[in-house]
Each structure stands twice: as structure tokens, then as C-alpha cells.
Amino acid sequence: MSAPVYDRIALIGLGLIASSMYWAIKRAGLAQEVTGFAKSAESRATARRIGLCDRVCESAAEAVEGADLVVLCVPVGAMGRVAAEIAPHLKVGATVSDVGSVKRSVVEQVGPHLPEGVHFVPAHPIAGTEHSGPESGFATLFDNRWCLLVPVEGTDPEAVQCLRTLWEGMGAKVDEMTADHHDLVLAVTSHAPHLIAYTMVGVADDLQRVTDGEVINYSAAGFRDFTRIAASDPTMWRDVFLTNKEATLEILGRFTEELFALQRAIRTGDGDHLHEYFTRTRAIRRGIIDAGQDTAAPNFGRETTQ
Amino acid sequence: MSAPVYDRIALIGLGLIASSMYWAIKRAGLAQEVTGFAKSAESRATARRIGLCDRVCESAAEAVEGADLVVLCVPVGAMGRVAAEIAPHLKVGATVSDVGSVKRSVVEQVGPHLPEGVHFVPAHPIAGTEHSGPESGFATLFDNRWCLLVPVEGTDPEAVQCLRTLWEGMGAKVDEMTADHHDLVLAVTSHAPHLIAYTMVGVADDLQRVTDGEVINYSAAGFRDFTRIAASDPTMWRDVFLTNKEATLEILGRFTEELFALQRAIRTGDGDHLHEYFTRTRAIRRGIIDAGQDTAAPNFGRETTQ
């Protein structure tokens, strides 16, 4: 057990990330008390049933009352509204953070609402699964994953350091970068791939109607990995694309350009071009395994399913 | 142990599929003897070292001599050449099959070389990992996966039945369809997704050069699944695209059309369109889990890596 980093932490929104944070905080004893609030009465009831949070509150205002750290774990599109709601109830000296997948938009939505004397340190843990809701969390979600902190100009270094200690205590590796740079990097590693996976699964669904479930039965190769990505929370992803519009569209533009070049190589039968391209991409996979972000076990170490 | 289905089976090419077949055949006792041949002397030496095949031969001709079943496990582009080489050495009454990911091209390349009295039953086990080579195989690769048989017109039903029994003995579920239909279904479930993953990984690689490994470090979400797909054998995939050109280009055309529609929704801020689309694709994932082609465990049941 580490020493507590904060006396009281408030989690606003109780989905996959917040519930994993709660279990990870408890695992390492990083706070004396964790309060929680979810907009949906059903989620609050579930949280109480499974013991998620020391105290589940009936309003965001109640949850943030007296909290030293408030973490906004709601879809990016809801950040501004929630910030406006909690702002009058924040304790002087408290830190507000978030876990949104887009950072420039969160900075712009949340920043203006926060009163003097409250620190603002946006953050983004790069971890997740295709599941969502208060029951989807688990204590090890952040182990050995990165959490990116995006402190705004003039932030108290001590507030940043405290939040870093919290994330490290939850198992994460921490890095800092600017909001714009974060949004570009994530457009490449996450946002564009998600949109592409959603698209391909949609195309297959159209075909499925004429081929009677074959697409589902014969999905072992390639398509199956796309469906996992494309099964992620629709509201979260809608907000990601609407709030990281520019970087996502830029990367999709590059993607289309490359795809057209490969399509032309197929059409003209340019096997050398294809082989060279595929050899290059194979090497990148090796880099990811070396960087510890995945396992080299075949099929991602998946068990054969029955 | 089942009764042997064939006295002697010859595996031509000793990569991931052939080596998995060998271990699966041995696990269930499906043949008295399995011979093997690989073009590369290094692969033959590896096979002998790890006990892959009862007898590793120095030529394809020697391996097929007296075999009741010959399975071509070479890249699709090499099927015609190998068929020409083995044709004079095939036993009367033998069955020739293959494991290629494209079927129309294999039928056209191999069929004309086969002498009278030899049965030809093309096949495609839909299973694989991102690894290749004689050491990558394992006995459970085909368990609960589909193997598609594509018998050509006039094939002896008994030869088809024997091959079906073999694949079922190796753990697979078996279905039959025409070559053209197979190639269209696979273009959707496998070939187009692979090209798309290769493309996205290539785009990220370009960006990586300017952002110093960030793409690799922050690949946990989305991109990581693409890299596994894009790490598959370059020669095999070059041949797939060159030999299933028409269906792949058709599906990529549909994909581009859908992608442009989603890009436009992002640009114009049409959140309802995005949310509706993502909700639909999420349901497809559920269908795949119900069909037993994947696990519902978060993150595909991957272990956290160190």
C-alpha cells in the first residue's frame, strides 16, 4: 500500500475508465475516500450494488464537495456541461482532471468554467476495452499502459506532480505533451483506426444481408479484430470524431491516398510494390511488441473459444 | 484416437498451416504417415530438428510418391508451378487439395495439370496467426474454426467426404461453396480488412518518423489490432491480392464510399449519423461472439504484458 495521494477523489461518470480507476485506487490505497456520480439512476444503483465507490452521490455537486481531485469521466461532448455544473461547488485548491480521448476540446470546454484557485490538469489514460458501463472496470486496466498529461500553461507544477503520482500508483507510465500534439498522435494511433474499423464492419454488414451469416461465421481472419474495435461505445466515439475533427480528417486524407496507391498496385499487378509495403509494416509490429504494448503470443494470446 | 482417414498424407510447403495440420493430424491419429517438403533447405532442416512430419523429403516429387492425399500449402502464386512439378508423380486415385486463401485462381492454376484418376478438392481453413514458418504451427489452430471446401464440378463425392472427415478430425467445422462465392466472402472478411490494416500501419509509420516512437508507445487503442493483421506473411498476402483482384477491388470500392460518407458526417458535425452507424456495428460484434468465433473477455482475453 502506498500513502494516499489525495484525501478525497470524486469520479464524475461511472463507466469503464472510472470504475477501473476506483479499483486501481483501492488496490494501492491512493485515496482516503472516493465519491462517485453517474447521470443514470441505473448506473448509480449498479455502482452501489457492486461496491463501486465509497459513496455514490445523487448529484455531481454533492460528489465534488470537499474533493481534492475531481476527475471527469464523461464523454468528451459532455465535459463543458458537467464543468459548469460542478464549478460552484469546487473546493479552493482542488485539482480538476479528466480522462477524455481528445484534449484540445476538453481544455476549451472545461477551462473557462473553473474558478480561481482550482488547478486544471487534463489527462488521457491510453487503455480500454470494447466494453462499457460501471461493471466493465477492473483494477489492472492501466498496468503498464501510458497516461498522457496535458497541463495548460501556468499550471502549478505541484498539482501536475500529484496527478502523476496517482496515475503511477494505478500502474500507468506517465508522459506530458501539449493538447494539439496529443490530438494528432491519437488521431493516428486510435481515432482514424477506429473510424476505419467502423466503416469496414458496416460494409460487411451490408453484404451479410445477402449472404446469410457467412460474414459472421467466416470472420476468423482479419475482420474479427475490426469488430472488436468497432464494438466500442458509440457515444464516446461520436464525440471523439466531432471534437478531434481536424486531425482525424487529416490522417484519413493520408490514409485514402495510400489506400489508392495500393489499390492501383493490385489493379496493375505490381507485386513488388505490395511485397515491399507489407514487409515494412511487419517490422512495425515488432517495434510494438518490443515497446511492451502487446504480446507476441500467436493470435494475441487468445484462448481458442468454444 | 480416430481411425486413420488416409494411409499417407503429403504436405507440400511447411509453413504455419502445414505445420499445424501435422500436429493436428498426429493428435487425432488421422494418417499412418505424413511426408513433407519445403522449398527452402533451412525449413527442411528445421522440420527435421523439431520432428515436423514423419519423413521430410528432398523433393516435392518424392513427398507425393504413394500419397493418398497431397495438400499444397504454398503461397497462392506458386500453386500452378508446384502442381506441374508433382503431377507426373501422383498415385492413381489420390486426392489433391490445398489451403490457399483464394480459390478461383487455385482451381485455374492447379486443375489443368492433374492427370485422369486424380481427385481435386480445393480447401481453405479459415484460421491463422500473424506468425509464419515451420515452427509457428500448433495442434489446436483449427479447433472450432471453419474449413471451406470448394469441390469442382464432377468431383467424386467420396473424395470430398474423406477430406471433410480429415478436417473435422483436425477440429474444424466444414462447409462447402463455389470458388467465386468463396472469393467474395473472403474479400469482405479477410482480404479487404488486411489491405486496410496494412495501409493504416504504413500511414502511421510515416508519421512515426517525425514523432519519435510515440506511435508505437501510444498504440494501445485501435492501432495495435491493426499491426497484428499487418504483420502477416508478405508473400502470402501479395499473392492473395493479385489473385483475388476483382472481389477485393469491389469491396474496397464500397469501403471507400462508406468512409467518405462518414468523413462528411464528421466534417459537417452530423453526430446522429455517426452514433447510429456505430450502434449498428456494435451489434455485429455481438453476432460474432454468439457464433463462437471470438471471446467476450475484455481485450480479447489478452494478458497484460510487461
Image (tube, coloured by chain):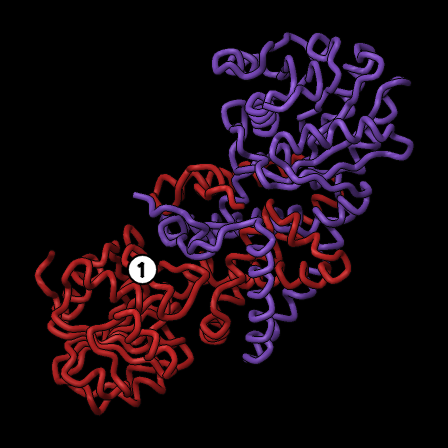
Chain colours: A purple, B red
Q: Is residue B35 left or right of residue A89?
A: left
Q: Quadrant of the C terminus of chain A?
A: top left
Choose between A270 and A1: the one closer to the eye: A1
User: Label 1 amino acid?
Assistant: Phe
Report the label total. Answer: 1
- The residue positioned 70% from the left and 65% from the top of the image is A257
- The residue positioned 64% from the left and 40% from the top of the image is A126
Q: Chain of mark 1?
A: B
Q: Whole-percent x and y of residue A134?
A: 54, 22
Visible in this render: residue A15?
no
Visible in this render: residue B260?
yes
Q: Which residue in the protein does label 1 denote? A: B138
Q: Quadrant of the N terminus of chain A?
A: top right
Q: Quadrant of residue B165?
A: bottom left
Q: Is residue B272 left or right of residue B165?
A: right
In the orientation shown, which residue stands out farthest toward the left?
B3
Q: Is residue B267 left or right of residue B66?
A: right
Neighbor class of circle 1 (other Cα within 10 Å; few <14, some 14-19, many 20+) is: some
- The residue positioned 30% from the left and 69% from the top of the image is B50
Q: Is residue B131 left or right of residue B281?
A: left
Q: Whole-percent x and y of residue A120?
A: 82, 26
Q: Quadrant of residue A265?
A: bottom right
Q: Whole-percent x and y of residue A166?
A: 68, 28
Q: Is residue A241 above or below residue A91?
A: below
- The residue positioned 46% from the left and 44% from the top of the image is B302
